[in-house]
Amino acid sequence: MADIKSWTGERLETFVYNENTNEHLHRYALAMQLVTGKDILDIACGEGYGSNLMAASARSVAGVDIDEQTIVRAKEKYKKENLSFLAGSVVHIPYPDANFDVVISFETIEHHDEHEKMMQEIKRVLRPGGILFISSPDKLYYSDKTGFKNPYNVKELYRTEFEGLLKKHFTNNQFFGQRSFFGSIIAPFAGSAGADALTVFKSDYTAVDSSGMNAVYVVALASDGPLPPFSDSLLDGAEVLRRQFEEYRIEVTKDAVGNITREIRSSWSFRIGHFILSPLRLVKKMFHA
C-alpha cells in the first residue's frame, strides 16, 4: 500500500494534505453539481477518491488511469455498484462512442503532448450536449513566473493556448481562474437583500459539504443614507502565512519531526516563549519530583 514515504508526487493520494489537496477537492466539489443522475467518465482518475465522491450522486462513474497498478489499488479501495475502474489513456479511452454525459479531467492535459487526440477522444465518448469539465495549469504562473519545473509535466499550456484548444472543439465555453490561498472571506449571508450567498464547499477525500460559510464574525455597513456597493471579497493571506513560517523557520524534510523541532527552537519567537514559560516549568518539576 502506498504511503507518504513512497509518494512520488505524480498523483494526489489520500494521505497527502497540501495546496493540491484543496485545489483538487474544490474542483470535485464543483463537479458534484454536474453529475447527479448522469454517467460520468473521470479520465486520469488517479487514486480514485474523486470518482468515489461523484459516485455518491451519479448514475455511474467510470474511473480511467494509464497506470495499471493505480487502477488495481482503486478497485480494492473503492467499491460501489455504480463505480468502476479501468486502465486506459486519454488518447485511447476504453469505452464506446457517446457513452458519457460528463467527462472530468483534472490536471491531465499537461502530462502528455497529444492534446488534439485527447480532445477528439473526449468528444467521441461524450453524448450530444455532454459536458467536459477540465483543468490545466497556466504555464505563465505555474512555471514561468515561479521558475518551478514539474518533472511529470510534458507539455504545459498558456491560458490562451488552452482556451484556443477548447474553443476549437466545443461551441460553448466558460473559463475560470483558480488558485490556492490562505486568507479571509467576506460575503453576504444567505437571504441577504440584493445579493446571492457565496457557496462555500468543505471537503475531505470522503465527502463534500456545501452547508455554508459558518461565519465566525459578522461584518456590517449601516447608515441613514444610501449604502455603497459592497461586493464579495477575498483577502489572500499567502504572504502572511509565508512570513509566519519564515519566522518559525519550519522546513519539511524526510526526517520532518526532527528538523521541525530544531528549526522552531532556533526562532526568536520560540526563545522568548521559552524564557517566559521557564518559571512554570520549574514549578511543574517541583510538584512532580
Image (cartoon, rainbow, N blue to C red):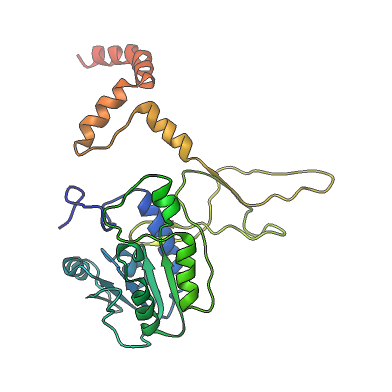
Tell me where residue 273 appears, x and y as whole percent: 37, 18
Residue at 43%, 62% (x, y): give it.
27
The answer to whether residue 56 is left or right of residue 165 is left
Residue at 50%, 58% (x, y): give it.
177
Q: Is residue 61 something one can see in this rendering? A: yes
Q: Nearer the viewer, residue 5 or 57?
A: 5
Vertical comparison of 277 with 98: above or below: above
The residue positioned farthest toward the right in the image shown: 225
Vertical comparison of 94 with 77: above or below: below
Q: Nearer the viewer, residue 262 or 193?
A: 262
Tell me where residue 52 appears, x and y as whole percent: 31, 68
The answer to whether residue 57 is left or right of residue 195 is left
Vertical comparison of 141 with 118: above or below: above
Residue at 35%, 75% (x, y): give it.
118
Tell me where residue 188 appears, x and y as whole percent: 64, 53
Q: Nearer the viewer, residue 195 or 152?
A: 152
Tell me where residue 113 appears, x and y as whole percent: 32, 67
The answer to whether residue 165 is left or right of residue 95 is right
Residue at 26%, 73% (x, y): give it.
89
Q: Quadrant of the C terminus?
A: top left
Q: Quadrant of the N terminus?
A: bottom left
- The total number of labels drawn is 0
Q: Is residue 59 something one can see in this rendering? A: no
User: Quadrant location of residue 41?
Assistant: bottom left
